[in-house]
Amino acid sequence: MKENIRQLLEQGEGISVEFKKASSQLPESFFETVCAFLNRNGGSILLGVTDDKTIEVCISIQNPIPGVMKLCSLKKIFLFPKCL
């Protein structure tokens, strides 16, 4: 999984990759992005990552953002970058 996250970070944001800062809660634009991905071919949302590819927050199962774990049942939309 680490390699997959590194590849997504190197690739940067695009039609199927979105970075969300998400330091302590889901950003307001989160569900808009999910809907956009669902209306296309899916995608990856990296939480805790800024637009300039900086990992600001290590989000994991041990350090979740409230409410996110319930959403993880959505098919392959979420990746949680740990400290690399």
Image (cartoon, grey):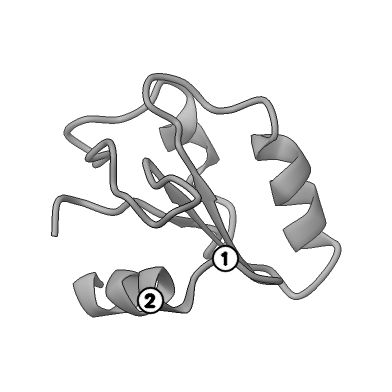
Q: Is residue 8 above or below residue 54?
A: below
Q: Quadrant of the C terminus?
A: bottom left
> Is 83 left, or right, of 77 in this rendering?
left
What residue is rendered at 30% in x and 30% in y? 64
Task: In the displayed orientation, state which residue is furthest to the right.
Answer: 39
What residue is rendered at 17% in x and 34% in y? 62
Q: Quadrant of the N terminus?
A: bottom left
What residue is rendered at 67% in x and 25% in y? 28
Percent across and percent down for residue 66 are 41, 20
Percent across and percent down for residue 42 are 68, 69
Q: Quadrant of residue 38?
A: bottom right
- Asked whether 39 or 84 is in front, the reply is 84
Question: What residue is shown with label 2?
Answer: 10
Q: Amino acid at mark 2?
A: Glu
Question: What residue is shown with label 1?
Answer: 13
Q: Is residue 42 above or below residue 24?
A: below
Q: Is residue 30 above or below residue 24?
A: below
Label 1 residue SS: loop
What residue is rendered at 38% in x and 19% in y? 24
Percent across and percent down for residue 56 are 28, 38
Q: How many numbered discs sit on the rendered protein?
A: 2
Q: Is residue 56 above or below residue 45?
A: above
> Is 34 left, or right, of 55 in this rendering?
right
The answer for how far apart the CA atoms under marks 2 and 1 are is 9 Å
Circles 2 and 1: CB distance less than 8 Å? no
Q: Amino acid at mark 1?
A: Glu
Percent across and percent down for residue 48 are 37, 41
- Asked whether 54 or 59 is in front, the reply is 54
Is disc 1 surrounded by few (<14), some (14 to 19) or many (20+) residues within 10 Å? some
- Asked whether 58 or 10 is in front, the reply is 10
